[in-house]
Amino acid sequence: MKLLFGNLKFSKESVKTKFYLFYLLYFIVSALVVTAVKRQDFKTCEQSSFCKRNRAYADKLTANHSLISPYSVIQDSIIIKDGIISGDLINSENNLIFIFELHLLEIGAARIRINEKNPLKPRYDKAKDWALIQDPSYTLEYTLIPSKPDVTSLSFGKERKQAVSIYHSPFRVEFLVNDVPIITLNDRGFLNIEHLRKQDAPGLVDQSNSENDQVIEDENDLDKGLWKETFNGKEDSKPNGPESIGLDISFPGFSHVYGIPEHASSLSLKETRGGDDSYSDPYRLYNLDVFEYEVDNPMALYGSIPFMMAHRKGASAAVLWLNAAETWIDITKNKEDKHRLSSLLGFGKLTPTSTSTHWISESGVIDVFAFLGPTTSDIFYQYGLLTGFTALPQSFAIAYHQCRWNYLNQEDVAEVDESFDKYDIPYDVIWLDIEHTDGKKYFTWDTVKFPTPEKMQTNIGIKGRKMVTIVDPHIKIDDNYYIYKEAKDLDLFVKEPDGRIYDGWCWPGSSSWVDFTNPSAQEWLIKKFAFDQYKGSTEHLFTWNDMNEPSIFSGPEITMPKDLIHHGGWEHRNLHNLYGIAYHSATSKGLINRSNPPRRPFVLSRAFFAGSQRYGAIWTGDNFAKWDHLAIATPMLLTIGISGLPFSGADVGGFFGNPDTELLVRWYQAGAFQPFFRAHAHIDTKRREPWLFGDPYTGYIRDIIRERYALLPLWYTLFHEASTTGMPIIRPMFTVYPEDEETYAMDDQFFVGNSLLVKPIVNEGQTSTEVYFPGNEIFYDYFTLKKVQGSGKVQIEAPINKIPVFLRGGNIIPKRQRIRRSSAAMRTDPFTLLVALDKFGKATGSLYLDDGETYDYEKGHFIHLQFTFSKRKLISKSLSVLNNDENLYAQSISSVRVEKIIVLGLDLKPKHIFADCIDCSKNSKRELQFGLPTTNLANAVIIKGTDLLITEEWVIEFS
Ligand SMILES: *[C@@H]1O[C@H](CO)[C@@H](O)[C@H](O)[C@H]1NC(C)=O
Ligand SMILES: *[C@@H]1O[C@H](CO)[C@@H](O)[C@H](O)[C@H]1NC(C)=O
C-alpha cells in the first residue's frame, strides 16, 4: 500500500521526525507533478541501459537485411545423447564461445539453455530453483530426421508429432508440430549475450545506433551505462559490467499472444513497436510498487511471470523465459512471411499475421521452455507439471474477505463482525493491516488497540470465521525488536556491496530486509509462525505478505538497489523478481508447519513469480476506485490465470479513493466472480462496509455475496481442477472456444470454469450491454433461468441489481442455497443441482469436496462426483471410493441430501420422475414429486425435497 498525496496527518502521528521529513519532501515533490502514476519514478527502456542497447541491436539488424546474427554452431560440436542435444556456438564478432543445450522433455515441451562456455565467473542460474518443482525428465522418445548437413532435426514425443530443427549458421531453432513451425528462436537474429569482462578489457561491440550517439553528452551516456548507471540521482554501481541477454522468439502464423503478467493491459498483448495501436515501451517485468498505476500501460507492476502463450485456430504454443532479472519484452506483428506461411498452414487466401517477440534480461543465462500444446489445456497442464499446480486452498479462502486499512481496534473488529450478522451478509475473514502492530514491527501487536488478540480471534473463530494479519518483509531496525535481533545475529540481512547491512526506509522508518533466498532465512522465517513464536496468533489466524517486491521508499524505483548482495554473493539485480516468491514460500511453509498434523496455509502475496501458485493467492495491488480500474481487473486476472496462477483477485471497491454506490455495487458484482474475493480500502477513504449504504444498495451487495456463497461448491470444484490439471478458474473466451476467432481478443467477458459466462458491467450509468454467445449453443440467464434468445452478439439488460451471468447449456453445477453467515456453517448443508441441457438434451458436471482444511484428501478423504444427463436420465457416479471406512470425509457428510434439482431445456414435459440407486441390491425405485414453474420459457422442471444422498450413486429417470 501507499500513502495518498497530502496525507500528513497519518505520517505525523505514527512515525518519527526523520521519516516525517522524508515524507514531507516526498509529498512536495509529488505535488509538483500531475496526479496518477509518477512515471518519472520508473524507468523507460531508454533509461535502462541494457534495454536500450538490446533494442538498438535489434534496430540495427532490422534496418539492414544483409546483417545476420553472428552466432553459429561450431562444426561437428553437436552431440545427441539421452534426450539432450548439445553443442558450441561461436560469436563471429568477438570469437567468444557459448554452449547450448536443447532438452526434449517428457511433458511435451523442450528447453533450451545457452551460457558462456568459459565465463569469468558463473552467471546467475537459480531462477529455476524457485520456479520449477524439479528438474524435468528428458524423453527418450525421439528420432533423428535426415536433413542437410547444416541442420540438425529430430522428431519427438510418442507419435513423433513434435519436431525441432537447429539451423547451424546463423544459429536458429525452430519447433514444429505436425510439420508446421510454431515457435522459432533467433529468427530475426537478436540473440545477444553480453559476456562477462574486466573493465579495461576491450570486446564490447558498440551496438547503439548513430542517432543516439549524437545526443550522448555526459559520462553515463558515453559509457552507455556499462559499468555504472544513475537514475533519478541514485547510482547503480555495476562491478560486473554489462551482462545482459537478449533473444527473439517468433510465433509464425499467430496473430495473438497472451501472458507475461503483471500489467494493467489487455488480454491479447499489444504491439510495442511499429503498430497502429502500439505502446512505445516494451512490456516490462520488474516487481515494483507502482503508486496509482495507470490502465492500458506496459509498465511493470508488482509481479512477474515470464510466460507467454500464442493461440490460433488449430494450434497453441507457449514459452517460459526463466529469468528473474529485470526483463523487457517487445512485441511486433508482421505479415512478411504470409506467402510461405499461407501455403504451409493451408490458409489459402487468408493472410496470417505472425507475432515476433524480443526478450531482454539484465543478467543470467538463457533458459527457455517451449510448450508445444497443441491445445491451450495441454499447455496449462505442461506448464503445471513444470512449475507446480496451484495449491488447493482452505475452503474459507475462496469465500468473501473483509479488509480495510485499518480496523482500528478489537471493538471495531467485533462491531464489524457483528454487523455482518445483523445485516445478514455472509463473510469469512476479517483482515488487519499494518496498524495492528506495535510500531510496524510485524509479529507484534499494538497492545492498546489489540490487548487480547487470542480472545479476539477465538470470538471470530467460534463462528467459523478467520482473521488475517499483515506480515511484511521490511524489518524495523531496533535491537529491542526480537525479529530484528535474531535476523541480525543469524546474519540474514541483505548487504551493501561493502558488507554493511542495508538500511532503507519503509513503514517502520529505518529498516532492513531479510534475504529470503538464503536457505537459513527460509528456515528461520518458517519457525517464526509457530504459535509459541508468533505471540497472540491462533489457528484462526492467517497471513498477508505485502510490500514484497520489495517496496523500499528510499530505493531506486521504490525498490531495492540492484547492487546489494544476497546469499552466495549474488547481486540483487540477478534475482529481483524472486524476492516476493521467496518470502511467500517461507510464509506459506510457516503456516503449514505450525500445526501438527499440518493444515493448509492461506497467504496472500502482492509480488509473485512463476511458481507462486504453489504458495497461495495474489491480488492486483493498489488499484483505484475508478471505473477504468474496475474494467482492467478482468483482463489482468484472466492474464494472471492463464499464466499458471489462478488464485487471484482485485480489491473490491478500489483501494484508493471513494467509490460511489453504483461503482461499489458493480465492483461487488464483478468481485463475486473473481477467484479471490476481497474488499479493501485505503486508510484515507470513507468507511464502506456493505451496510453503510442503505437499501437498495446494501441489498444488492448482500445478494451478490450470497450468490458467491451459493456457488462455493462450484468454485471449490474448479480449484480442485486447477490443482490437478492447471486449468485456469476463470477462463478467457478463447480457451473455451479455441476455434472461434471472434473470441481471441475478447477480454470483457469470460467463463467461470466452462459453465458460467460472466460479463461485468464496468461503465457508469450502464444498464444494458452486448454479450457474445458463441457457438450457436444454448445459454440460460443464471438468475431468471430463462433461455437467451439468439446467439452471437445479443443486447442484454443489466439494471443496477444485476450482473449478466449465463449458464451454458450442457453443464450441471452444484450449489448450496441455504443462507449462512460463513462458509464453515454450510459444511453439512444440502445441495441443489442446476442442470442446463444443451441442444442434444445432454449435460455434465462434477463436484469435488473435502474437509476444506487439512491434507487428509491426499489419503482419499474426499468426494468427487460426476453428474451426467443424457437420454432423459440424470446419473450421479462417484469417481472415488465413497462407502469405505477409509473415507472419513464421505462419512462426515453421509446424511447430506441433494434437496433440489432444476433441469432446464427438457424437450418434453415429464409425466413421472423416478429415482433409483445404482448397484444396490434392494429395490429402491420410487417416484419423485416435481413442479413446473408458471413462466416457463426454459422448460424448467423442479424436483424438490428428494431423499437422494450426495454420497450415494443414483439415477433419476424423466419418463
Ligand atoms: C548493411 O550491412 C552490410 C554488411 O555489414 C554493409 O556492408 C552495408 O554497408 C550495410 N548497409 C547499410 C545501408 O548500412
Ligand atoms: C517443520 O515441522 C517439522 C515437524 O514438526 C519439523 O521437524 C521441522 O523442523 C519444521 N521445519 C522448519 C523449517 O521449521
Image (cartoon, rainbow, N blue to C red):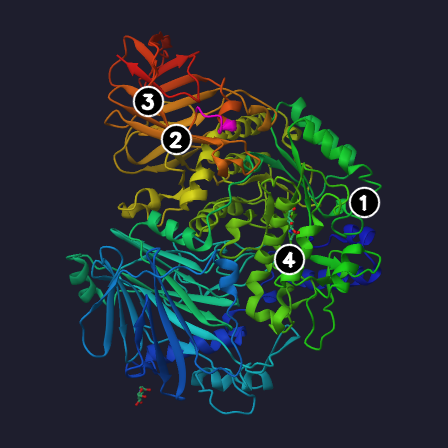
**Disc 1 residue type?**
Asp
Q: Is mark 4 within 8 Å of ligand 2?
A: yes
Residue contact between numbered discs 2 and 3, judged by CB atoms under 8 Å: no
What kind of residue is marked 3? Ile
Instruction: Please name the amino acid that badge 2 sits on.
Output: Ser
Residue 522 image label: 4
Q: Which residue is at a point 60% across and 59% down the rendered structure image?
A: 549
Figure check: 217 above or below 791: below
| Marks 2,4: beta carbons within 8 A | no
Which of marks 3 and 1 precedes in the sequence?
1
- Kind of element beneath mark 3: strand
Tell me where residue 211 appears, x and y as whole percent.
Answer: 44, 83
Residue where numbered disc 2 is placed: 846
> What secondary structure is marked by label 1?
loop
Question: Where's residue 651, x and y in %?
Answer: 58, 43
Crowding at mark 4 (Cα within 10 Å: few <14, some 14-19, many 20+): many
Under circle 2, the secondary element is strand
Q: Which residue is mark 3?
A: 875
Name the image quarter holding the C terminus: top left
Return the residue nearer the eye: 739 or 688. 739
- Where does the magenta region start and end? 883-889
Q: Which dot, 1 or 3, sits closer to the camera?
A: 3
Residue placed at 18% from the left, 56% from the top? 347
Res 446 label: 1
